[in-house]
């Protein structure tokens, strides 16, 4: 792997990890077009995830630090009997809702009867399919969710304007999550983990907007919730890297370049996403995912009829 390869992969990782276009979907499409499976160094993939983790922690460092301090204060209150659910401040509420939002991830480890697989294995099954019809439909679903979320946000603002004159649209919507909100977001995060093409950041943001949460607060919750998710992905890939026979066969300067690029691009992607959301320009992502999803759906239908990959001419079947 060269420095140029590291830069390209760092840019792709940083962009698609946070923008609502689905990193897993774009990876599946790239592999489908080139006919090359993801045979890159596992350790390098782990370090790219570390780069994006650094980006989100750096962007939300003040919030993350305040949550860490509040977490230990909350633990102290629990043991001394001072904790009261009805009197949680914003940080304490966010901590509890983040924990609740992560609970649905345990669904991933439930065995699927009669298959010898767990739910999480469906992600590899779908992303490794020879024909990407699931990815196509998932991209279309991302577009629909983004559109519905944006519409719900506008309706929420309109209702608020009727009752609160003189305030900005930016402040409309609930500031904090409740238990139902957190569970809904958590379930959507599970769906995004299983379906290549379903954007985690886009779909969980949309669910928050549908539930009446302020759009910027919904995005903040999505990104902070992503910290343990990205960390878990890095740990799991790290374990695979340790077990891999290829080991660490990439040079340190290449790794460092990849990490730095993914971190910088990831940070800018978060900044860009928040600007698009604040400026009500989410239509760009709605249209993009719809076009890519529709084009991939057409390609998938043709490939099903022909039984071959249109790009590589290799045999392709819907079910392997």
Image (cartoon, rainbow, N blue to C red):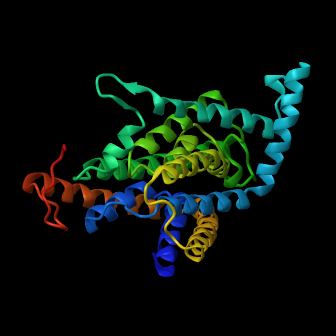
Q: Nearer the viewer, residue 89 or 300?
A: 300
Across and down, in percent, residue 73 comes to: 88, 34
Across and down, in percent, residue 61 comes to: 77, 56
Image point (47%, 79%), residue name: 2
Q: Is residue 101 above or below residue 51?
A: above
Across and down, in percent, residue 8 comes to: 47, 75
Q: Nearer the viewer, residue 209 or 88?
A: 88
163 relative to 50 in the view: left or right: right
Q: Quadrant of residue 264?
A: bottom right
174 relative to 13 in the view: left or right: right
Image point (71%, 38%), residue name: 176
> In the displayed image of the protein, which residue is found farthest to the left?
306
Q: Is residue 43 above or below residue 319?
A: below
Q: Nearer the viewer, residue 173 or 194?
A: 194
Image point (34%, 51%), residue name: 140
Q: Nearer the viewer, residue 169 or 271?
A: 271
Q: Quadrant of the N terminus?
A: bottom left
Image point (14%, 62%), residue name: 314
Q: Quadrant of the C terminus?
A: top left
């Amino acid at each position: 792997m060269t420095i140029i390869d590291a830069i390209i992969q760092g840019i792709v990782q940083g962009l698609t990890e946070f923008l609502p276009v689905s990193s897993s979907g774009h990876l599946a499409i790239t592999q489908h077009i080139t006919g090359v499976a993801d045979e890159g160094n596992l350790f390098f993939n782990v370090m790219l995830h570390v780069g994006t983790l650094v980006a989100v922690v750096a962007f939300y460092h003040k919030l993350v630090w305040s949550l860490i301090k509040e977490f230990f204060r909350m633990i102290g209150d629990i043991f001394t009997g001072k904790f009261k659910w009805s009197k949680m401040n914003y940080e304490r509420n966010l901590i509890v809702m983040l924990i609740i939002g992560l609970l649905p991830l345990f669904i991933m480890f439930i065995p699927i009867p009669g298959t010898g697989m767990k739910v999480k294995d469906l992600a590899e099954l779908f992303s490794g399919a020879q024909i990407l019809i699931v990815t196509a439909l998932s991209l279309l679903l991302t577009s629909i969710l983004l559109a519905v979320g944006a519409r719900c946000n506008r309706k929420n603002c309109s209702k608020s304007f009727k009752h609160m004159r003189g305030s900005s649209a930016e402040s409309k919507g609930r500031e904090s999550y409740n238990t139902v909100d957190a569970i809904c977001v958590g379930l959507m995060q599970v769906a995004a983990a299983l379906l290549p093409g379903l954007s985690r950041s886009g779909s969980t943001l949309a669910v928050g907007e549908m539930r009446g949460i302020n759009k910027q607060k919904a995005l903040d919750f999505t990104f902070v919730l992503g910290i343990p998710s990205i960390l878990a992905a890095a740990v799991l890939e790290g374990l695979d890297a340790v077990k891999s026979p290829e080991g660490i066969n990439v040079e340190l300067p290449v790794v460092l370049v990849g990490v730095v690029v993914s971190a910088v691009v990831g940070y800018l992607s978060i900044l860009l996403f928040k600007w698009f959301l604040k400026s009500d320009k989410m239509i760009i992502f709605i249209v993009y995912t719809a076009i890519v999803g529709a084009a991939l759906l057409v390609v998938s239908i043709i490939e099903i009829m022909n039984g071959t990959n249109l790009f590589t001419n290799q045999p392709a079947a819907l079910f392997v």
